[in-house]
Amino acid sequence: PAQDAMDDSTGGGRVNLSAHRQETSSKAEDSWSVLNCLLEPAWIDDLLEAECFPAAMPHWRAHILEPLESFLSTPGKGLRSELVSLGWTLADGNGAPPSQLLAGVELLHAGSLIIDDVQDDSETRRGKPCIHRTIGIGPALNLGNWLYFVAVDLIARASMAPEKKSRVSDVVN
């Protein structure tokens, strides 16, 4: 159908959006699996420099990581990942975008949802009580803001050509 095709200004052809949706659906799933990997103890320990602050780790796990795991266990539609994938394709990206880039975008969005829920005094998000309803406003604000920084770190770790990484960094930062 006409609405499922879009001009590809980079090559003069058309992009089949239906095929792209199927392709990006698996990419969005990949980004969620990266998010799940982020909750792996080794990555968290590296990120938080656990060897320097061993006494803080139980607090981090109880007050930050467990609520985050609960929030991420009910993923959204992955629309942002799909848009990044589409942009990557339209910009003549080679292959699929790095999963860290997709996951980083989802983490930025997750952080913004948490902050927005506090600001709007929302009751539920994705069928569950909002995080600030379960852990309190202060910890929820800390988690939402922390996600912004984790996302930037994750995006910085993505494997990309230096010129692409520089452009992405300009946008993210």
Image (tube, helix red, strand yellow):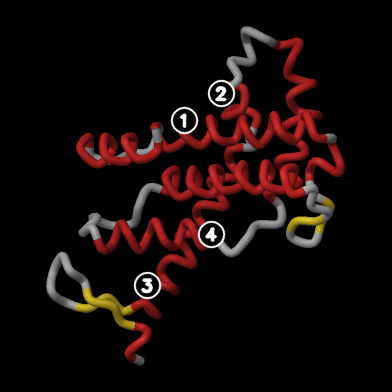
- Residue 101: x, y in percent? 42, 45
User: Is the residue marked by circle 1 packed among few (<14), some (14-19), or many (20+) residues within 10 Å?
Assistant: some
The kind of secondary structure element at disc 4 is helix
Q: Which residue is found at the position 79% from the left and 21% from the top? A: 59
Residue 88 relative to residue 64: left or right: left
Q: Quadrant of the N terminus?
A: bottom left
- Residue 154: x, y in percent? 47, 35
Residue 12 relative to residue 152: left or right: left
Q: Which residue is found at the position 35% from the left and 63% from the top? A: 86
Residue type at mark 1 is: Asp
Q: Quadrant of residue 170?
A: top left
Residue type at mark 4 is: Glu
Instruction: Please give the count of numbered marks on the rendered protein.
Output: 4
- Marks 3 and 1 in Cβ contact (< 8 Å): no
- Asked whether residue 81 is in view, the answer is yes
- Marks 1 and 2 in Cβ contact (< 8 Å): yes
The residue tagged 3 is: 20
Q: CA distance from mark 3 to mark 1?
A: 28 Å
User: Is the residue marked by circle 2 packed among few (<14), some (14-19), or many (20+) residues within 10 Å?
Assistant: few
The kind of secondary structure element at disc 2 is helix
The residue tagged 1 is: 153
Q: Quadrant of residue 118?
A: top right
The residue tagged 4 is: 29
Q: Which residue is found at the position 48% from the left and 47% from the top? A: 105
Residue type at mark 3 is: His
The residue tagged 2 is: 47
